Image (cartoon, grey):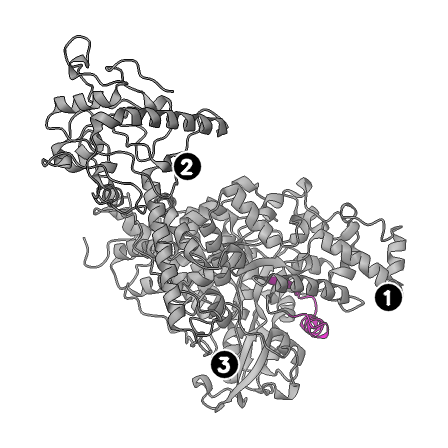
Amino acid sequence: MLSCGTASSRIGYRRFIPWLPGQPRRMAPIKGRVSLGPPFSSSLCGMPADLLPARGRSQLCRGSSPSPVWAVPPRCPTMRHRFSVSAPFSLCWPLRSSDSSSNRGTANKMSSSSSTSSSNNDGQGKPKPKSPFCKRGSLQSTTSPDLCGASGPKPLKSQRSLPGTPVSATHNPIDLRTSMEEKYKEIAEELFTRSMTESEMRTAPYEFPEDSPIEQLEERRHRLERQISQDIKYMQEKSFDDVDDGFRERALPLEREYQRVSISGEEKCGVPFTDLVDAAKCVVKALFIREKYIKRSMQSFCKTTAHALQELGMKPLDLTDYDDIAETPVDADAPVHPPVSKTHPYDMDHKNMPADTGYGCKMEGGLVHVYSKKTNMDKSTELDLPYPDLTEYIEDMNVMMALIINGPVKSFCYRRLQYLSSKFQMHILLNEMKELAAQKKVPHRDFYNIRKVDTHIHASSCMNQKHLLRFIKRSMKKYPEEIVHIERGRGQTLKEVFESMNLTAFDLSVDTLDMHADRNTFHRFDKFNAKYNPIGESILREIFIKTDNCIEGKYFAHIVKEVMSDLEESKYQNSELRLSIYGRSRDEWEKLAKWALKHRVYSDNVRWLIQVPRLFDVYQTKKTLANFQEMLENIFLPLFEATINPRKHPELHLFLEHVRATAQQNPSTLLGRPVCFYPVCWRVCVQVVGFDSVDDESKPEHHIFNLDSPLPENWTEEDNPPYSYYLYYTYANMTVLNHLRRQRGFRMFVLRPHCGEAGPIHHLVSGFMLSENISHGLLLRKAPVLQYLYYLAQIGIAMSPLSNNSLFLSYHRNPLPEYLSRGLMISLSTDDPLQFHFTKEPLMEEYSIATQVWKLSSCDMCELARNSVLMSGFSHKAKSYWLGPNYSKEGPMSNDIRRTNVPDIRVAYRSETLSEELQLITQAVHTEELDTIDEEDSLSMGPLPGQR
């Protein structure tokens, strides 16, 4: 039994009670006026007055005595149980007294172990002076007349009401002098026993529960909101019993306003106004350069950025843009999975394909030109297509190179990037719980069942090591006598190939294959390429992971289809596999298309990208090619020919896209051009979505791309052309091809190269100007101007941290979390699961490791997954099912949390932050026409017309 010594002693309950619900852990006077903010103050003021400590009430309600004292209620049956975090219990009732002396007397009576007179309160006959500070653990309380009223003591109130509901005064007053002392002894004993039990459960003496009244109030509010939502759902289901229950889920309440971080004042960027104007002009100039090249090639440009540039009053470029091909709109309540076609996309009668246009084409100066007649291909019959100008590109390239090394522009962009990082951290501190609560309200949806696209993965390494090992063993047992290789004119069976290596199926293991990247591949791209050879033998690579071999890519097709089957089984994972076109011969496209059609390599979860390795120097050394233009012809002329006459190249046409005829069209008016000669409007779902440029970026470049560089037909040197040379001629031919395919009603291609993994910084400049998305982008961390431009233009970046960790950059130094906090459009991808991953689901492995290392939240992961879908080459209709029918709009209205599991708060924050950054630079320009940037004058522009 807990006993008290004398009447003058006070029980230090804090020594026995580590935490008392409803009581702050530290009570100290609040000096000065401190604003607690609307949520905090309203929560406190909305509570019953008896829940507040005296000192806290004096600050909020004005008029308390200087010594805070707490009063403990009588014993309650609920005290035997652990307190619920979600609803704080009220343990204190205010005790009224007409003056401070009576308050002290009442408090001392409550603290004593026996009934004594007030004259014995101190041993000297004087009242002991009290400190204005509250003792830690004191249970005494004083109340002010303002809180208690002047009409007499308030009755004790029952606390057995619902959490959060003010308790009405329904009971008669209780005489405290006759009943309180014994009650408090029992309460003290009960709390002491409970505190000892909880202390035994703790792992350390310094660990205390982290509950607080504010957290309890928030939890109670969320619980009530969930209850209201469930009641609304029940009433709707009761009223509409005949509604189809396919994807119709409960109507979620609109998200309330979130806490925003803003900066007031005239100078918001922290730099002098003249520096701001000069930097803004340079940034806007760079954005206009990108918009020009992206729209000319008919790739996608960020709508928010485009609208901001239009506000400058610039004359829009006449690029003959076309509207997207009309598709059936997706209903808001449609299921998340698109309907599956009952027929295979490769099953089509060749007679129903579009007819021949009669056009001719040939390559001049590294660029394919299209003519209206095959027999007369000269300037008089050349079609009016937007052929890129090499001189214009070189000039724009020089402007961009001057921009990224300009000192004031670098300082401005660096400051803005630091501001974006800090602003995101503030956003997380203020809104993280709201984002999590919004995700919890969504039924069924979580990170596992939202759409994720692996936007950067190579087909030849799309499987893991164990998968490839099992497939090789199975092939050795199933097809031992099949001829798989030609050696010196003699065919070799699969069994003979392994016998020549002194190996059997039993001898093989993951360690024997030796295909996983290790510490020896770091900064050694040559050793990494050697890892593609199983057991170090290039013959096995040709047999199992090539499309063009003695068995016509049979084994490779089987293993890719097994990977596709795994993706379809997971339902929510998709991939964009890279297949190689080397440019060594003209028939590479036909062989690749026949491989896909013969083995029926297709899945709704997979799209193709064509990667072009930058290996001209290798082919030139082997005398395979005469000049660089021959390589370009082998890559692009088959595509032009299949576009002009699909019936002549049916396999290639079907591989590029599967087609369905929908409606009759007048060929003389289709798309407003009299150049189409097919009688049907073709609705297509693109199979090949774009081009990729791959190789080791760290290889030294011995040539600078400028006007003195030789044209492709004159490039006969053994040195490899520079990166920007490859990228420009790929872009230029793709641009002409896109306009020709658009006229025919076919889908276009995009440029998504490997860029910024290593090597010089100008690779990222070329990528910024010409590419819709890029892969890697690691070097942006060293170029603040380019990083800021990539953010403003929202250029997609497919990042692969595990791949970078084995090749160029350690995992903890990867800039992915920094890019994410600043708002760059990034996604996670696997690159090469065969070399870097161990599990059956490499994309989930990538997300898992990133989440654990960088402590990403569920909202962060869902945002990355949503970005991957937006960046991908899947059709508009598929994205409408996966993200919502309004995904292409701007702001939070583009988000459907029922499908993406990304809170509207996060989408609104990203959209508003981007708009604010664009508004900052556009308001600093204030002109209808940008001044010409003078490279020799350090890019410092003069004052605008009409300004001082």
The CA distance from mark 1 to mark 2 is: 75 Å
Q: In the rendered structure, does residue 759 fall within the stretch colored magenta?
A: no
Left or right relative to 383: residue 646: right
Q: Determine which of the numbered discs, if any, sits on residue 482 in the image.
A: 1
The reply to whether residue 852 is in sight is yes
In the foreground, 402 or 154? 154
| Label 3 packing within 10 angstroms: few (<14), some (14-19), many (20+) | some
Q: Secondary structure at mark 3?
A: helix
Q: Is residue 281 above or below residue 337?
A: above
Q: Is residue 713 above or below residue 403?
A: below
Query: Which residues are the magenta region?
Result: 576-602
Residue 25: image location, x then y, percent: 32, 29
Q: Is residue 91 above or below residue 294?
A: above
The CA distance from mark 3 to mark 1 is: 47 Å
Which residue is denoted by mark 3 in the rendering? 743
Q: Residue furthest top?
A: 124
Which residue is denoted by mark 2 in the rendering? 81
- Look at label 3 and name its amino acid: Gln
Mark positioned earlier in the residue sequence (2 or 3):
2
Residue shown at 27% from the left, 28% from the top: 27
Q: Secondary structure at mark 2?
A: loop
Which label sits in the foreground, 1 or 2?
Answer: 2
The CA distance from mark 2 to mark 3 is: 75 Å
Residue 530: image location, x then y, percent: 72, 50
Left or right relative to 81: residue 128: left
Residue 492: image location, x then y, percent: 88, 63
Residue 730 picture quarter: bottom right
- Look at label 1 and name its amino acid: Glu
Q: Is residue 684 above or below residue 107?
A: below
Residue shown at 82% from the left, 50% from the top: 508
